[in-house]
Image (cartoon, rainbow, N blue to C red):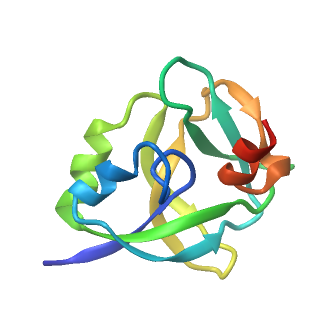
Amino acid sequence: MRTVPVAVVAAHRRGHPLHGELLTLGARFLRVARTAPVYRLLALDGAGVARGGLVRVAEGGESVEVELFTLAVGAVGELAVSLPSPLAVGRLALADGDSVVGLVCESWATGRDVTAHGSWPAYLAAR
């Protein structure tokens, strides 16, 4: 079975409300990493589980902490179809120059910009 690394930034992280979805799909933790400095982290608008997402920007981006998991290729597809809009599966650039599959936001996403916190857990701790 072919696997790929997948980056998550918010509610799918270890210890967060949607992490169980990754475990159900067979995810295994790899490591904590940082994105290339080309993203903004948004606390997305909406009710229910607090969700965050990464939006790639042409300027004013920063490096944001993510968690990397390994998932079977088919499980990535299952994850993709389960995500509510504006979340999606796309490519993320990492600070070390690698590119991985990851959870991203479509460019029209709305929410509070929380990039200055550097990570989703740091944002949650500060609110």
Evaluate whether residue 40 shows in this view: yes
The answer to whether residue 59 shows anywhere in this view is no
Please identify the quarter of the rendering in which residue 123 is found: top right
Q: Nearer the viewer, residue 19 or 81?
A: 19
Foreground pick, 110 / 15: 15
The residue lying at 40 percent from left, 44 percent from top is: 18
- Percent of width and height locating residue 67: 53, 66
Q: Identify whether 117 is placed above or below 6.
A: above
Query: Percent position (x, y) of residue 91?
Result: 49, 59
Q: Please, which residue is most extreme toward the top here?
A: 47
Q: Residue furthest bottom?
A: 96
Placement of 76 over or under 80, stated as above or below: below
Residue 97's place in the image compared with 94, above or below, is below
* Front residue (pair 47, 104): 47
Give the quarter of the figure containing the C terminus: top right
Considering only vertical position in the picture, is 121 above or below 83? Answer: below
Q: Residue 108, how many percent across, how many down?
A: 61, 26
